[in-house]
Image (tube, coloured by chain):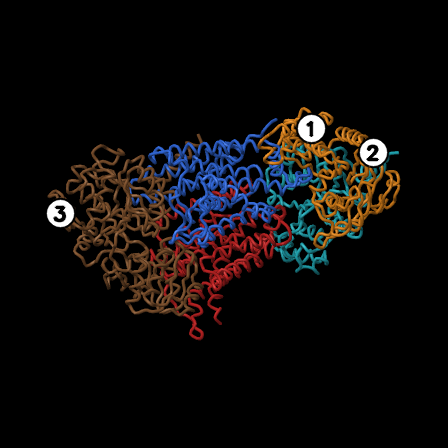
Amino acid sequence: MAGIVVLMGIYTMLALALNLRFGTAGLIDLGVVGFFAIGAYSYVILTAPAPGTADAYMFGFHLPMFIGFVGSGLISAFFAFLVGLPAIRLKGEYLAIATYAFAEVIQYLFTNEKWLTNGVKGFIGIEQPFRKFFVSANSYQYFYAFLIVLAVACFWYILSRLERSPFGRTLKAIRENEDAARAAGKDIERFKMWAFVIGAAIIGFAGSFYVWFTSLVVPSLFVSEVTWVAWIALTIGGTGNYKGMILGAAIIVGIQEATRFLQASAELATILAASRFIAMGLILVLIIRFKPKGILPERNTVN
Amino acid sequence: MVLEVKNVSKVFGGLRAVHEASFQVKENSITGLIGPNGAGKSTLFNCIAGYYPPSAGEIFFKQEKTSGFTADEIAKRGLARTFQTPQGFAQMTVMENLMVVPKGQVGEKPWQGLINGKKVKEQEEEIRKKAFKLLADFGLSEQKNDLIANLSAGEARIVEIARQLMLDPEVLLLDEPAAGINPALQNHLIQVLLKLRQQGLTLLIVDHNLGFISSLCDYIYVLHLGQIIAEGTPQEIFRNPRVVEVYLGGIA
Amino acid sequence: MLKKFLVSCMVLSMLVLPGCGQAPASTPTGGSGTSSNNSSSNSGGDISIGILTSYTGEMGAFGVPVYNAAKLAFDEVNAEGGIKGKKIKLFTEDDQSTVESGIRGARKLITANGVIAMHGMVSDVLLATWDFAKQNKVMVTSPYAGTTKLDTTGGDYQYRTVPSDSLDGRVAAHVLWDKGYRKIAVMYETAESTTSIANAVAQQFQQLGGTVTIMEPFQSRQSSYLAELKKVSETSPDAVWLGSGQETAPTVLKQWKQRGYKWQWMVSSDIAVPEIFKLVGTDTMNGILTEIPAGDSQSEDYKRFAASYKAAYGKDPGGNFEANSYDAAMIMALAMVAGGKADGTTINENYKKIASPPGVKVHTFKDAVTELKKGNDIDYEGPSGDVNFDDHGTTSGSFNALIANNGKWEQFKFYPASAFEKTK
Amino acid sequence: MSLLKCENVESGYGKLPILHGVNLRVAEGEMIALLGANGAGKSTLMKTIAGILPLMKGSMVFDGRDITLLKNHALAKMGLGYVPQENNVFADLTVAENLEMGAFTIKNAKQAIEAIFERFPKLKERYKQKAGTLSGGERQLLAVGSALLLKPRLLILDEPTSGLSPQATESMIETISRIRDDGTAVIWVVEESPKEVLAHVDRVYLLESGLVKKEGTGREFLEDEEEFETLFLGHNVG
Amino acid sequence: MDYIPYLVSGLVTGTILLLGTVGFSLVKRIENFLNIAHGQVLTLGAYLGYTFNVKLGWNIYLAFLAATLITTVVGWLIFKVFYQPIRSHGNLYLLFTSVGVAYIIHGVIEAFYGVQAKTYSVPVSKVLEINGIPIISGTEAAVIVLALGSAFGLHLFLTRTLTGKAIRAMASNLSLANARGIDTEKIASVAWLLSSALGAMAGIFSGMIGTVYTDMGWAVILLILSAAVLGGLGSLYGVMIGAMIIGLSMDLSVIILPSSYRPAVAFAMVIVVLLFRPQGILGGEGH
């Protein structure tokens, strides 16, 4: 159970960030996994010990865990800023494709630039926060699940507060009507950039949490499926509704776990893996068809 | 002169929508810009508001050259506009629509919005009061919690004007404000606009119909096929045979 | 309402799909084959062991053979009466060749099924699950996790019955050198195992005095490798070592043939499977070399293993680490017998001891139990070779050098573990 | 019998109606002008008749058949031609291809296109040119020509002279009255040069705020000069 | 002379990509959404080709025809079942539905065929050599000729037939097409049929050149998106050029870069193009 909660939490974080970018600011971002990877690697490179003889990477700063964590969000945000400088002006689908391409390039870079990322070998044995206070891994995993829930609650609080602030109101206005927002004297690129950067920071932090969960990073963790799963969680749960996002993440992780309990034999595994894809696809298609605003749609705030 | 348009041209592909148009708007006046459909009014209007960069010519607002500025920069300098078909933040309430607009909101900085400190709260309260007063002035108090998407066309138009007034503009550009509004509401609108002028606002109204505009404007410019073909007081314009020909056709 | 509908849709898809899928005749079921009952998770009398392996995804081809071979070993153990009367019961999980799935699978096996040992992980999954397993006193073994990352960190609650990739690469270099090639190129996919083997091949070959003309990493699963082949051909090597998986290697080899290049190929052990002949074509494959970490296929142990494997599953073992998986499972069972208890700690404590010298050499479960009962120290040897472990839980390993000949991999040279001890 | 009969038509965009119950009739071969201020609902009415906007209330009968639920392309096949005010040609297609699309549903398309070329020689000169590169007048000509290919019984023209030069306007008016003379009924949305147009039309409808405010012959409208000027120029204040 | 083999391999990659991309942007133009599932249509075609060619032992060209035919029909059915009913929701919903559809097709293929890669039985053909350098094999030549032939056929269809012109008309101005009496539903169906047929062909061609595997669709849709953006999303001729540029630049990049960067070259080009010419190489002004 604890493992499921952790993954649900991490996907909820991604969905939360995506909701700020898309639900509030209307940016179609298909590059979630790119920032996720940047966050994860930032954390690892900041905290990794100096390279051993068999390692190809050059930088391991061996900084305290806390700094690594903060760094993962900040560095991801910084990259979002760099990407956003030219890309934030792109409209709709063009932004989607640009961010998608960005995420792919990031994966190739992380695979090939060994001096930075240790290539496909990646980093292993990553230390987990507060691990030393726990004797057994079993009790720790419950603590970690608790930590994740805490973090999700924290992000939830921050984001819902942001959304209700004048900042969030302006973002929504931009989502609703860019021309009118411009007529109201809003520098829409700047606001979009903020949404993009804050979203990236949260995705970056989620990267740290993910690294602690997997205890290793390799480039193959960061495939575009992560982006799609985050989107699916957001879409089926309900854009603009925080409970919806948690529900969406729960459904997606739930589908994957449910098939696990049907796992009885080796041969069945292929079918089960296949039905996971089918179930994920079906649920997305059906929700869009019959409840296009998601299971828990956004409620319009009334002052 | 609060607004000066000097030899502005705008070309789209091969199409010349506006050709060396020049005109001026006096402070605290109500100036009209009229012309038949396709005359280039909206294009010129968009050039002034910063939605299109002019292909040639210059525009000055309060003696500052604003051609080349983006729309939001121009809006912040006190030149507010409305749209031909009312634009609003559809899935937001009337109140929220108004509250989006004011300049210099501290809470628009994400960290300030997050902390939601005293300054933000005070400012929000101020803005809310201001919006409430505007809505009351326009007779829209009851609709303050309605979504823009659910308003009638006439209401949407008035809300848009109210929303843009939240900018505290010096000049208000109105794009066919009377279109789609029934006569009773039109009269109400005229009263509102006249009152705004009394309060010191300068108005530039674009319309293709002389009727509404003549009862409001001090001075009118007539645009036809991208060029200013006449200017003068409403009376002068009505007597101008060129204008009458453009509007009614040759066989008069 | 809607949720209900969706859940039923999901279940429906699962019920319908197996019907149309290709279900091989030899379907082993998780618990039932090895014990009487597979419904309860950890019924008192049974010893639960988990097979966490890749049935799907990139490494999907290896899952079933690894499972089958391990099951063969445990079936033999159960047939001999199990361990102190307790039968071994298998649970299995698909890691989908991804770390995330692997972690989830491991957690389920450990927390829900209460396994005392897990077997069958690929490198990344093993690394990601090992700490959690160790904390829960669950033993972890792998028949094919060659990653060099374990070279110095393994040994505690973690063993592998396969040599490290670095040794694998050195052997490949030796085989090419022994065949008389002096100028080779190295092409490899940017995956962890292929990269580390490729580096080892190049390093060793240069140490032997040969020339490596080019190291060409490439991206897997592209539609065309013509450009890469051309680049390699420009360096005119005598032979090319190819490190690649089953999805990509056929494209490379077919396009090599189509373009009429002539060099000698040596391929990594990922491709040393029977299926490759169907994928690439027997003609194209003829004469291609490979080496696999395995016991001497001429040995009695291997022949006996191959025969019972064929009897159980209707297929010859080969190329999919079946022998390694069998031995890992067998040693696991023996470690429990030797320690007299069925838990992870016992397996961990006895794993190395019973498979490494000194001790009486034993080859079957029955003999081993007899020797252990006598109070003798034993040294198990199985179809995959000596299976002696170093301090970090890795077997020294022997290798078979194979050549493709008319649709089959034929052994042309055997390199016993002793051949490489000095180069280590 | 009227060719087109609209009763109590309500329609609009989204949920809110712009037309609040319009009644309109067109007889066979009749030319109708539709007047009204911006936002009065002229284009909305045209789009509703052409089947582009769905009807919210009321009924429409064309050629004796209820067309309330019919889609745009089916109406076209019944002989209802529509020339929208904007985007009325396929900009990416050549002039010839545009005409072929106009003749999509008819049998001897080639001959019909030849006939259009004869009628509008200007189009023939440019038959290989992309429609997007034509001048405004040529574009309108092409749009009208394409619509004529269907041999429509009723042709709806939404401000066909908008943005045209005086000469182009004049020749367009001429062209359209010739179309009527050939027996096609026409609904003409008029914004500009109303005097010339009204001299040609049989009847006029004046729309205000989504309702028909006045109905009469072209002559009646032209004769009542004061009201006419009020309508197009507004009140002469002062 | 030395670079000719790179050019040829670029041509092969490019022409296959061209077929896939043209089908993709046909849908983009008619339905105005990014059909992520188009990659899976290629995969489906490739697997059906495998069934006929290997499982049933048919000649490759016969298998090619049969697989293309079936995929075409399946593609059309997918349109009818999944996309048509939600058209009014808007293009973002269509895009995410296509993601769902992609997962469904992916799952179904994996359930039927398993995860192991497949290859066709294509007889090894003679290689044309110049100065001892192998230039092009028969299969490659056949693929290039057939792919370019199909693209040219599509061009003829779109410019010479009434239905083809109607497709272009519909893409140019949907409501006007309706007003002209064109049954746009029917024309949309034709466009989907064409798109799926071209996708299937692209899939089978890549099967003839390389291997067929279940993740193929995800890998290829990225390249298709790249080529489409490069050429200007909606412009059919633009994306043909875009596809060729991507194919050639990927294979020529191998000369100077490690080939593990090959696909990244394509994506990097997309980013650069979007930054400097967001409307694509041949796209018109503004969108």
- For label 3, the SS is helix
Q: Nearer the viewer, mark 1 or mark 3?
A: 3
| Disc 2 crowd, CA 10 A, few/some/many (<14, 14-19, 20+) | some
| Chain rendered cyan | D
In the picture, measured across the screen, residue B71 lies left or right of residue A287, that is: right
User: Which residue in the structure is indicated by mark 2?
Assistant: B215
Toward the bottom, the furthest residue is E131
Q: Amino acid at mark 3?
A: Asp
Identify whether E275 is placed above or below A300.
below
What hue does chain B carry in this figure? orange
In the picture, measured across the screen, residue B77 lies left or right of residue D111, that is: right
Identify whether A104 is placed above or below B203.
below
Q: Chain of mark 1?
A: B
User: Which residue in the structure is indicated by mark 3?
Assistant: C367
User: Which residue in the structure is indicated by mark 1?
Assistant: B131
| Chain rendered blue | A
| Chain rendered brown | C
The image position of residue B231, as x and y in percent, is 85, 43
